[in-house]
């Protein structure tokens, strides 16, 4: 085994463990130039964005207010009091944006539909003009040869539904199913790929417990768990609604946030500990993977969750778990960062600190490429479904350089490393069908406003001018070569987790 030094860490506890883990990273193994097996034929190269983050046009054509319209107006809730009123003005500039996607050679674009455009009050009368926008957008995508993957809910709950209890009201399952039906009726002649809910852990956890995101509440654990159960049922009912109303066979999956753990060393027992921690309900934070995925895919809450949460768990009515467990076609995961884990002295997985100086993004998320190999592997082993990476990307503070270009070498390095690891999982036989970079374009990053930039394409918000970053050109080459440009290399990656 090759041993490498990382940031001068050579001795002592976690540091040594971490350094040896870094040394053992599978990504460090160089592939001889030209000999890489490549990504499979038909692999889907995509990029993603979401309605509130890019569309702007906050009141256009009858759109109703969402919880983000309300929350972002509260002074101090969003960095520099930013909001999505104009964002990237994608609502009006979608043709230009689709042309950019086409220029990059994207196979697929993951977009979300804004519920309050379709139902300004959340339920009741459909606002046809709101759906017209998605009609136009999807037609434009298809003309460009780009497959739309549609998320129904990426966090912009109609405000009127929040006033009726939002995710705390069990009726939301019906409201959401009716909305799913309306969207499917209008778009499913052209849309085949669907994801009902984007990252439910995050919109409930950050929105209802931490008050960091809209609607900005701080609920107790039992109330939060009620909302979790309602949300899972809403997922189930929406899948039923989609299956019942689509005009062609649909591929329906999750867009599940993942809280990731990587082994702190190359000891096999630390690898096991990291895997155990990934699925475990080990604390009462909202950051649970197994709880959601077991409910969605196995139709039961895991034993450790029932034990830990005890009486705080919501009453489970007869038939609830059957409703939640709908047949899904893929597991969509959003994967960004991780924490290192080792086997603790008590035999339990123990989260340990990153080595000092370990690489972080401007979001202060640690860079952990191996999650793109480990997590799909673990998730596929347990649930046996194909995997799609529906978000992965890096926050930076990009700007336009004096030469007029946007140079973002860290985004290129980040993406190449993560993709090499993803390829490692594919090469080992894990069925991974798609990769969506977050994001196609800089955008409104929730509570962080316009502070960070995640895009392959830079946006000057004052002029709405788009500039391709270096990473956009890099990604276009990745796509054109079906991944070969990141696999063909003669030197190993410098170590990282
Ligand atoms: C995910 C969200 C997405 C974006 C990225 C950075 O949690 O789904 O909208 O904010 O993180």
Image (cartoon, rainbow, N blue to C red):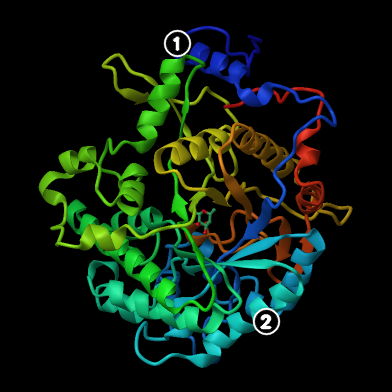
Q: Residue furthest right?
A: 403
Q: Residues within 10 Å of mark 1 (few under 14, many from 20)?
A: few
Q: Residue at x 68, y 22 (%)?
A: 28
Q: Residue at x 37, y 82 (%)?
A: 122
| Spot occupied by residue 85 in the image (x, y as percentages of width and height) | 55, 76
Q: Is residue 480 left or right of residue 65?
A: right
Task: Depth check: give the residue in front, 213 or 190.
Answer: 190
Q: Do tag 1 and tag 2 residues touch (Cβ < 8 Å)?
A: no
| Spot occupied by residue 202 in the image (x, y as percentages of width and height) | 40, 54
Q: Residue at x 75, y 76 (%)?
A: 143
**Quadrant housing residue 345:** top left
Under circle 1, the secondary element is: helix
Residue 217 visible: no
Q: Is residue 462 left or right of residue 193?
A: right
Task: Depth check: give the residue in front, 459 or 301.
Answer: 301
Q: Which mark is residue 92?
A: 2
In the rendered view, tell whether residue 60 sits above or below residue 197: below
Q: Is residue 336 left or right of residue 67?
A: right
Q: Is residue 36 left or right of residue 290?
A: right
Q: Which residue corresponds to mark 1?
A: 13
In the rendered view, tell whether residue 93 sits above or below residue 106: below
- Image quarter in which the N terminus is found: top right
Residue 93 visible: yes
| Spot occupied by residue 274 in the image (x, y as percentages of width and height) | 41, 27
**Quadrant housing residue 222:** bottom left
């Amino acid at each position: 085994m090759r041993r490498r030094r990382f940031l001068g860490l050579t001795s002592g506890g976690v540091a040594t463990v971490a350094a040896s883990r870094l040394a053992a990273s599978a990504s460090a193994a160089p592939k001889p130039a030209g000999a890489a097996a490549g990504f499979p034929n038909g692999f889907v190269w995509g990029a993603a964005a979401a309605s509130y983050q890019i569309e702007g046009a906050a009141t256009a054509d009858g759109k109703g207010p969402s919880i983000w319209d309300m929350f972002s107006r509260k002074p101090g809730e969003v960095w520099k009091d930013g909001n999505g009123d104009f964002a990237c003005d994608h609502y009006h500039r979608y043709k230009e944006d689709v042309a950019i996607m086409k220029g990059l050679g994207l196979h697929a674009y993951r977009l979300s539909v804004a519920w309050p455009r379709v139902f300004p009050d959340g339920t009741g009368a459909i606002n046809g003009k709101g759906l017209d926008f998605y009609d136009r957008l999807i037609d434009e995508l298809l003309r460009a040869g780009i497959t739309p993957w549609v998320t129904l809910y990426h966090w912009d709950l109609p405000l009127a539904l929040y006033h009726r209890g939002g995710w705390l009201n069990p009726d939301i399952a019906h409201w959401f199913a009716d909305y799913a039906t309306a969207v499917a009726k209008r778009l499913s002649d052209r849309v085949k790929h669907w994801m009902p809910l984007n990252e439910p852990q995050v919109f409930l956890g950050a929105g209802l417990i931490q008050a960091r995101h809209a609607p900005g509440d701080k609920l107790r654990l039992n109330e939060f768990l009620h909302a979790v159960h309602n949300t899972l049922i809403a997922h189930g009912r929406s899948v039923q609604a989609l299956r019942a109303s689509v005009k062609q066979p649909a591929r329906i999956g999750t867009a599940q946030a993942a809280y990731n753990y990587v082994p702190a060393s190359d000891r096999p027992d630390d690898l096991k500990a990291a895997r155990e921690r990934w699925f475990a309900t080990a604390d009462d934070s909202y950051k649970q993977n197994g709880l959601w995925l077991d409910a969605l895919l196995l139709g039961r809450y895991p034993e450790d969750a029932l034990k830990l949460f005890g009486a705080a768990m919501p009453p489970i009515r007869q038939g609830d778990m059957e409703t939640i467990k709908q047949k899904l076609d893929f597991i969509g995961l959003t994967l960004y960062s991780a924490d290192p884990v080792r086997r603790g002295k008590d035999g339990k997985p123990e989260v340990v600190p990153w080595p000092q100086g370990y690489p972080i993004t401007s979001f202060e998320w640690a860079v952990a490429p191996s999650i793109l190999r480990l997590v799909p592997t673990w998730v596929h082993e347990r649930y046996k479904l194909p995997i799609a990476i529906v978000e992965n990307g890096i926050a930076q503070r990009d700007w336009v350089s004096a030469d007029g270009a946007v140079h973002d070498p860290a985004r290129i390095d980040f993406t190449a490393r993560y993709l090499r690891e993803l390829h490692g999982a594919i090469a080992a036989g894990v069925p991974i069908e798609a990769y969506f970079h977050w994001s196609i374009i800089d955008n409104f990053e929730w509570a962080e406003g316009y502070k960070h930039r995640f895009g392959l394409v830079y946006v000057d918000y004052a002029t709405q001018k788009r500039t391709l970053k270096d990473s956009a050109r890099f990604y276009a080459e990745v796509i054109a070569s079906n991944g070969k440009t990141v696999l063909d290399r003669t030197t190993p990656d410098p170590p990282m987790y």
